[in-house]
Image (cartoon, rainbow, N blue to C red):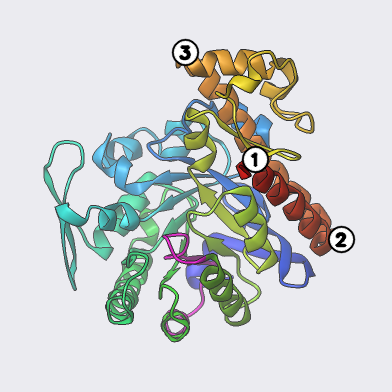
Amino acid sequence: MTGVAGGSRFVLDAVEGRARAGRLILSGGVVETPAFMPVGTAGAVKCVSPEELGDAGASMILANAYHLYLRPGAEVVGALGGLHAFMRWPGPILTDSGGYQVFSLASARDIDDDGVTFRSHIDGSSHRFTPEAVMDVQRRLGADVIMAFDECAPGGTTRERAALANRRTAAWLERCRARFEATRGDARRPQALFPVLQGNVYDDLRAEQLEAALALGDWPGFGIGGLSVGEAKTDMWRTLELLDDMVPSGRPRYLMGVGYPDDLLESILRGCDMFDCVAPTRNARHGTAWTRDEGQINLKGARFRLDGGPIDPACDCYACRGYDRAYVRHLLVLGERFGHRLVSIHNLRFLLSLARASRRRIRDGTFTGWVRRWLERYRAARTLRSAP
């Protein structure tokens, strides 16, 4: 591929219905899709080492440009060899633009057509993000895939507000691409730039945003933003099906911020290829684990006090191989971080295994039936637990 697509190559190996299995070939390695990317917000996945991530099956991880810009600074990361060396992660890395984090600071930022002025959530200091500045930050960080700067309108927003965000996102995308091309010689390693498709739940705005991106030329992949932000699931699924019909089939679709087990599988069913979410480790810190036959469970519950079984008998992760529910519960109740680490490893392995199973099922043509049975069992367990 040429132009902006020069930092990557995507090979689509199999399709079943809308579901796809492929390979994203990057300078840092090959990512088999569908792929879940663990989130290392500030340069580390909470409680989990790079070696443990590899053992759990991770091939690509995500880091957050906003947080790394504030601490320790993109210049520091760049001076220390870039994110791969800094994090001790040898595989591919994706950095988001920091746009979502900036726009979530509703009371601490001012948006205009040129960019965003915001106050740090750490010390209140003032900062300015423009499309050019965000490209420069991600160049210094040195990830394999970097995201264009976009405006994410909040869930439940009006069509007028979503249209304004779309207009800015399209204008900023053109500036991001220009800066990306102008600084190509500064890159530590080949990088791929993905645009972010916004539009909330408005079909016409989603179509307009994609058309605006395609008018700028070829792209190595597409981010799908502005979903899983409080809208109805039916709206989310409809939007994904709309985009599946419109986004070029030979490019990966990265659904941003989605990573609960049922949402992951529903999105794969609708043509999405890449995912990230903090839920595996965030839930783990609250004692919540995902299981195949019992759905989502809270291991702090008294019913696990004498339970000598693994978190999930169907799981082969480090935690399930070596520790039982009673011990993990004991750690969680006391607030011991080793308990958080064990559940984090399990939850990450759970999602990574779902993605791996999805790849295999898509390739052998059994995905649709398998995923319907899996979701029925998982949701039945959730319904049973919530019954009075």
In the rendered image, residue 223, in percent from the top left (x then y), is placed at 49, 65
**C-alpha distance separating marks 2 and 1:** 29 Å
**The C terminus lies in quadrant:** top right
Label 2 environment density (alpha carbons within 10 Å; few <14, some 14–19, many ≥20):
few
On residue 366, which mark appears?
A: 2
Which residue appears farthest toward the front when viewing the image? 388
Q: Mark 3 points at which residue?
A: 334
**Residue visible at 38% across and 58% down?**
185
Q: Earlier in the sequence, mark 3 or mark 2?
A: 3
Q: What stretch is highlighted in magenta?
A: 210-232
Q: Name the residue under label 1.
A: 385
Q: Which amino acid does label 3 sit on?
A: Leu
Query: Along the line of sight, which residue is nearer the eye, 66 or 368?
Result: 368
Q: Which amino acid does label 1 sit on?
A: Arg
- Mark 3 or 1: in front is 1
**C-alpha distance separating marks 3 and 1:** 25 Å
Q: Earlier in the sequence, mark 2 or mark 1?
A: 2
- Mark 2 or 1: in front is 1
Q: Can residue 165 be seen in this view?
A: yes
Q: Find out whether residue 173 is within the magenta segment.
A: no
